[in-house]
Amino acid sequence: MVGYWTTLSNEALLDFLTLLHLCLEHFRYAGKRAALRQLPGSQLQQAQRGSASRKLINLDPILQFESLYYETTIEFSIIGLPGPSSSCLTTSSSSGSNSSGFAWQRSLQDANLATQVGLVVLDTLSTLMTHCTERLVEPASEALLNKTVGLHLIMLQLGQSETLQKHIFAALRGYIETFPDTLFQGDASVCGWLCFELLKSCNSKLSSVRQESSAVLYLLMRANYLHCQHAGINRVHLQVIISVSQLLGEAMGLNNARFQESMALINNYANTDKAMQNTGLMTEVRDLTTRVRTVLVATAQMAHHSNDPEMLCSLQHSLAASYAATPQLRITWLHAMARLHLQHRCISEAAMCEVHIAAVMAEYLKGEKLYSEGCAPFNIISPNILKDENNTRTDHAGGQTDTVFTLDSLITQLECCALMLDKAERYEQLGNLYRILVPIYEERRNYSALVHCYSHLYQAYTRVVEVNNSRKRLLGTYFRVAFYGVLHFEDEAGKEYIYKEPKVTSLAEVSERLYQQYCDKFGKENVKMIMDSNAVDLEELDPRLAYVQVTHVVPYFNDEENLQRQTEYERNNNINQFVFETPFTRPSEDEELDTNSLSSGSDVRTKTKPKAHGRLQDQWKRRVIVTTSYCFPYVQKRIPIIDCKVREMSPIEVAIDEMQGRVKELNDVINKKPTDIKKLQLKLQGSISVQVNAGPLAYATTFLQDVLIPSHSPTPSTTAMDSVSMASEGTAYPVNQVSRLRELYRQFMVTCKVALELNAQLIGPDQSEYQMALEATYGELQSALEAVLGTEGGALLHSDHRNNRTSQVSCASHPGGAYFSLLGGYGGSSMEC
């Protein structure tokens, strides 16, 4: 045979291999049902009636060939002698017995014959690869070599017996060792086909087949690693991920338990391979199997969470992340996420999905040396992009022949991003986007496209001016959502997220939506909403119930960010810190004494929770600042919380914060151009009316009445306790905070005066009486505050030398501004959770 092959041309040898393929197809095992269908109609009915009384054994060669092969022969079946399973042929009807026996004999013959033919073909291919190696590795014989390995894979596709499959896997191991260049250089179709068939065998019901296929798949990874000189297993990594996605899309699906077992076997092979212990192969294999597991788990959970849009999007995101090494598949899942966001009117998130898709394309083109920038320029749009899209794997040996992106496809995607950002009303981002697109147009001298770009920018910035003046653009509302109850939420129990809801969504709306969503999922009797923002004590929760806690939060900015982020857009773009506040009270010493005296004569002790509201001198506030893992907006509408800082503010700090917020609100209305006169009058009336202004007067009475301020200011070396002792003669609060609160009242009255004068300039003659009433009310408030603060003759509107330094401190934003710069170190306690 070897001598005959040497006389054949490559075309003739291909015909010979085609003949072997035809033999495999012709003698493939069709099963017992096919043997029954070959019977005449009357005999078929008799056989079916006979099998109704006693079920015939289905001699599936994949399951039972090994025992049958050694215990029976083809001749044994043909002559009809009693075989090892002849008892199964006995039925109540002799005619049915004869027909059933014929079907059993025929299926046994087919099984044995298919195995014999497969062994002959396998032996022939092994001889060819052994004695014609030099001819097969020639460039002109590439098709011949591909046909050779293709026959091995076709044998796996046809469903062979367990014994024959062991020989096929052994032949594949020899092929990988002998011809690695065919798999890891040039076209990746052969490597992809091999990965697909091996992964399908990893899902087999037979343990021995799973073990053999896992061993061959690990050997393939090992060969790829060695062939690339320890640079990685990029080609096998890419093809395995693609093959898994293809298997998930097939009707057969994947058995999660069996496939997970195969992945564990591959990891075990990597861990026990002593020759590769000090290399990076173990890490590469672990990374690949982890990604495969993520795909399997997320796919299995999608059907279960089909009515939970946030969870469904999270699962799609995990799938997209697992396909980070495969641009085409990652883009597919990003498109799916964008469609889901559009269904729920989350336009900003859909726009971010499109931007991430463009970044994936740019990074791929960088690997192909078609676009030098990659995804780095997209960082000006969102810092999330570099986190997610700069780890794209590329198979420079040609493994991504089915993933073709060009510069034209990138341009088309960027134009799509521009439309989505415009639809999301994030007009300012268009300038950043066109900074990426315009240089490409300029290099191509595409002046008509440049005209369109600048025209779109003109329209976008015109809209920016309009929405900044009207302040009617709504870019989202944020909520902290926490889940409790392992029985129902499983892995989600104990996790906290920040949810971004579109436009203006109230706390009641999002709470009701989540309540109905989880009632439909777990049952109404098993769901309970936690309606406050206090810390949850897990010991007090019923483990049989599912608890959901929803809290409204606002973006938080430090001193520097507060100065830089002045517009509504800047305060809602690329943000990852949020704040919410919870009021609580601490009982005074007198109340504690009363409580102790009541409980001293009783053995019963009750645990009482502090009230949310009480006297101002007992009113504390807990400020919680949380940090998310990504910035909003993102490809998801919810992002997990990764850090939490808690600060407890003392009563006087609460008063300072309240007055600081009032001053800022008035300044915002005054500085807005053009002035919204209705809003100005509402804020002004709410600030100076004594009837509705019990808050400021009450704070002044509680913290500033009869306070003695020292004639000297504390030196830098003065400690916090020194400050308290200096003010102890007239008040129990630190002198620094008392001085700051007095200064805020002065700023408050000055700002009210400016607002009053501005209103006088804007109103018409028909509102002159209203203006006079406001001025009279302002005078009453000024007199009341001067009586409390111990000033007179308009001294409240002028700062003295003690407050010059304090008055220069600008008011921080409320509640997301520079809290700690003004309040830090004064009697509050802080901790991290």
Image (cartoon, rainbow, N blue to C red):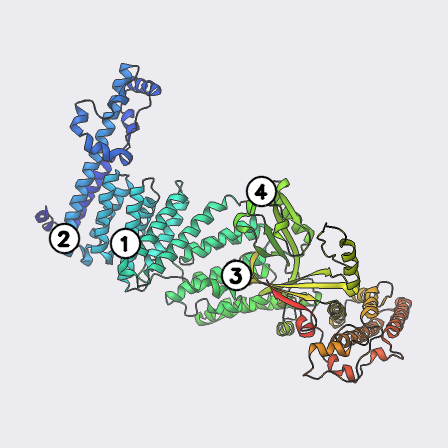
Question: Could you tell me which secondary element the residue under label 4 belongs to?
Answer: helix
Question: For the residues marked 1 and 2, what is the alpha-carbon distance in whole angstroms?
Answer: 23 Å
For residue 586, which quarter of the picture? bottom right
If you read the primary sequence from the N terminus, does the residue marked by circle 1 or circle 4 appear first? 1
- Residue 805 is situated, as x and y percent measured from the top left of the image, at 73, 82
Q: Horizontally, is 16 left or right of 499 in the view?
A: left
Q: Toward which corner of the image does residue 452 lie, by quadrant?
A: bottom right
The x and y percentages for residue 216 are 28, 50
Disc 1 to disc 4, C-alpha distance: 45 Å
Tag 1: residue type? Answer: Leu
> Which of the labelled discs sits on residue 132, or is there none?
2
User: The C terminus is located in which quarter?
Assistant: bottom right
The residue identified by callout 3 is 417
- Which residue corresponds to mark 1? 219
Say few, some or many: other residues with alpha carbon within 10 Å of mark 3 (under 14 / 14 to 19 / 20 or more).
many
Amino acid carrying label 3: it is Cys
* Residues at discs 1 and 3 in contact (Cβ within 8 Å): no
For the residue pair 643 and 434, the one nearer the viewer reads as 643
Quick one: SS at disc 3?
A: helix
Amino acid type of the residue that numbered disc 4 sits on in the rendered structure: Lys
Amino acid under disc 2: Cys
Q: Tell me which corner region of the image, top left, top right, bottom left or bottom right, holds residue 124.
A: top left
Please tell me how crowded label 1 is: few (under 14), some (14-19), or many (20+) other residues with Cα within 10 Å: some
**For residue 255, above or below residue 75:** below
Position of 688 with respect to 641 (left or right) is right
Q: How far apart are marks 4 and 3 (CA)?
A: 35 Å
The answer to which of marks 1 and 3 sits earlier in the sequence is 1
Which labelled disc corresponds to residue 521?
4
Secondary structure of the residue carrying tag 1 is helix
- Which of pointers 1 and 2 lies earlier in the amino acid sequence? 2
Of the two numbered discs 2 and 4 on the same chain, state the one appearing first in sequence: 2
